[in-house]
Image: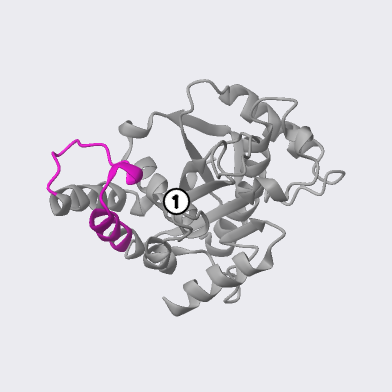
């Protein structure tokens, strides 16, 4: 089947569960984000990355890593992404909110795979809402060298086989496990922009050393967030957190953008 959409996927945060009182140890949040667009608009990804490098005065093939940029450079990059003909979907998991953390500690990358399931459900809804042809979504993950993407494809095949029993809500005509691939971050502009989206969201929920969060980047990429009937929560933003004030604050920031 033909490919109508492409989704670039990257994460911010880690999968560890070592939380120390002083704030050190594992990240409290794991954010997985997808930058989604029609295949015909894919050249805009390269164009935006090139424009960003020129604006930031970086060499032509300089790999963009959002964390490594200065604040004013992040602002400029986030603004460019917010103007793209694309949509974004993010899954935000507050790991201390998970009631049975040991479930995700027994097998490596199980939390990442579960986050991928939640992400791909929403990516498939987005593409279902906007499809023109009967094409599928190409899923391009930022390569995590120690993780098996054959195992991820196998996980998706299992979800498809057990979809009804496990309440899996992926639109399978759009998501084909065979169209999952992993590419190194520095090889594709789309992955570098997906990294910027994921890290922008991460900074909007993760306090720095002084207890402050930075949501300006999030607000700048806000125009790309997938909304269904004007609703972002549960669609372009999927939360797993017990503290609803975090959700309210982020939605308020989005509405004010």
Q: Residue at x 58, y 68 (%)?
A: 232
Magenta region, residue range: 57-79
The residue sitting at the bottom extreme is: 256
| Place of residue 208 in the rendered image (x, y in percent of width and height, measured from the top left) | 45, 53
Classify residue 113 by image quadrant. top right
Rendered view: 59 above or below 154: below
Q: Residue at x 26, y 37 (%)?
A: 63
Front one among 119 and 255 = 255
Mark 1, Cα crowd under 10 Å, few <14 / some 14-19 / many 20+, is few
Rendered view: 117 above or below 248: above
| Place of residue 39 in the rendered image (x, y in percent of width and height, measured from the top left) | 40, 49
Classify residue 80 by image quadrant. bottom left
Query: Image quadrant for the C terminus?
Result: bottom left
Residue 105 located within the stretch drawn in magenta: no
Q: Secondary structure at mark 1?
A: loop
Q: Residue at x 15, y 43 (%)?
A: 58
The residue sitting at the right extreme is: 165
- Report whether 153 appears left or right of 66: right
Residue matched to label 1: 209
| Place of residue 7 in the rendered image (x, y in percent of width and height, measured from the top left) | 47, 46
Front one among 54 and 212 = 212
Q: Residue at x 68, y 67 (%)?
A: 244
Front one among 156 and 13 = 13
Front one among 68 and 46 = 68
């Amino acid at each position: 089947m033909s490919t109508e959409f492409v989704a670039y996927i990257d994460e911010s945060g880690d999968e560890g569960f070592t939380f120390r009182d002083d704030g050190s140890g594992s990240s409290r949040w794991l954010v997985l984000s997808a930058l989604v667009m029609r295949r015909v608009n894919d050249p805009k990804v390269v164009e935006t990355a090139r424009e960003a490098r020129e604006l930031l005065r970086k060499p032509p093939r300089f790999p963009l890593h959002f964390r490594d940029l200065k604040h004013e450079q992040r602002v400029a990059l986030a603004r460019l992404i917010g103007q793209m003909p694309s949509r974004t979907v993010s899954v935000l998991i507050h790991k201390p909110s998970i009631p049975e953390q040991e479930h995700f500690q027994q097998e490596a990358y199980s939390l990442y795979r579960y986050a991928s399931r939640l992400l791909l459900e929403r990516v498939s809804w987005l593409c279902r809402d906007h499809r023109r042809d009967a094409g599928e979504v190409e899923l391009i993950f930022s390569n995590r060298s120690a993780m098996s993407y054959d195992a991820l494809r196998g996980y998706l095949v299992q979800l498809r086989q057990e979809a009804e029993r496990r309440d899996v809500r992926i639109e399978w005509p759009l998501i084909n496990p065979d169209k999952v691939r992993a590419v190194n971050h520095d090889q594709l502009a789309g992955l570098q922009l997906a990294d910027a989206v994921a890290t922008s969201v991460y900074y909007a929920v993760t306090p720095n050393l002084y207890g402050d969060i930075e949501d300006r980047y999030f607000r700048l990429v806000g125009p790309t967030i997938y909304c269904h009937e004007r609703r972002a929560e549960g669609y372009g933003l999927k939360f797993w957190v017990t503290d609803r004030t975090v959700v309210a604050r982020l939605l308020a920031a989005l509405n004010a953008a």
